[in-house]
Image (cartoon, coloured by chain):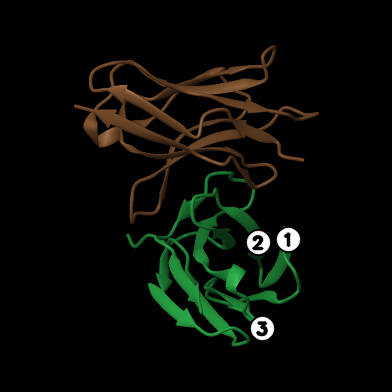
Chain colours: A green, B brown
Amino acid sequence: DAGVTQSPTHLIKTRGQQVTLRCSPKSGHDTVSWYQQALGQGPQFIFQYYEEEERQRGNFPDRFSGHQFPNYSSELNVNALLLGDSALYLCASSNPGIYEQYFGPGTRLTVT
Amino acid sequence: AQSVTQLDSHVSVSEGTPVLLRCNYSSSYSPSLFWYVQHPNKGLQLLLKYTSAATLVKGINGFEAEFKKSETSFHLTKPSAHMSDAAEYFCVDINKYIFGTGTRLKVLA
């Protein structure tokens, strides 16, 4: 039973560029949440997708957008990258009404 | 406003001694509180969860936590620390998807 997978593992981008991160949820899960974890801090909730729609959103600008596909996998897109976007991006999957979230290993994004 | 506060950013204990990681919450409703652990270069793993059932919650690897409404606390404890417990621990209000700032546990030989 595969857990949550994320790709790529590491990524280096330049300020102003755009990036797409990918996530496949744990088998049987249909809800995907994205978090940003800056160095030395706790994860911060970006948004959650269920039934291919954004259901909840944290305090992140519109530069952060996402998508969920019919197979429940998800993408996180960040436009106009800033140095401050450098962080570990975590994907978590769950089922509606079930609080427990399973996390992937994350994608380390470095913006130079 | 932050709904969970982890009172210690770093905790050091000797192997075999008790562990106490403190978490206070602020909420106008009964929260659903989790503890997650993050080992270096590994994903977050759920240790235990409180969802308004029993106030004393047992988790994996010998950890447990007690929900105390009168003290608005959900402290994580373990009777005897092991070297493998060294990691970052996060208290989480899962209703609001809010993580605490984390406590780094160091276990000394």
**Mark 2 vs mark 3, CA separation in Å:** 17 Å
Left or right: B17 as drawn, with respect to A37: left
Q: State the SS at label 2.
A: strand
* Relative image position of residue B86 (x, y in whole percent): 31, 36
Give the residue number, with chain letter if any, for mark 1: A57
A105 versus B24 height, above or below: below
For the residue marked with disc 1, what is the amino acid?
Answer: Arg
Q: Are marks 2 and 1 in contact (CB under 8 Å)?
A: yes
Which quadrant of the figure has residue A77? bottom right
Which quadrant of the figure has residue B88? top left
Crowd band around label 2 with a 10 angstrom C-alpha radius: few (<14), some (14–19), many (20+)? many
**Mark 2 vs mark 1, CA separation in Å:** 6 Å
Specify which label sits upstream in the sequence, 2 or 3.
2
**Residue B99 numbered mark, or none:** none
Q: State the SS at label 1.
A: strand
Left or right: A12 as drawn, with respect to B27: left
Give the residue number, with chain letter if any, for mark 2: A46
For the residue marked with disc 2, what is the amino acid?
Answer: Ile
Specify which label sits upstream in the sequence, 2 or 1.
2
Give the residue number, with chain letter if any, for mark 3: A80
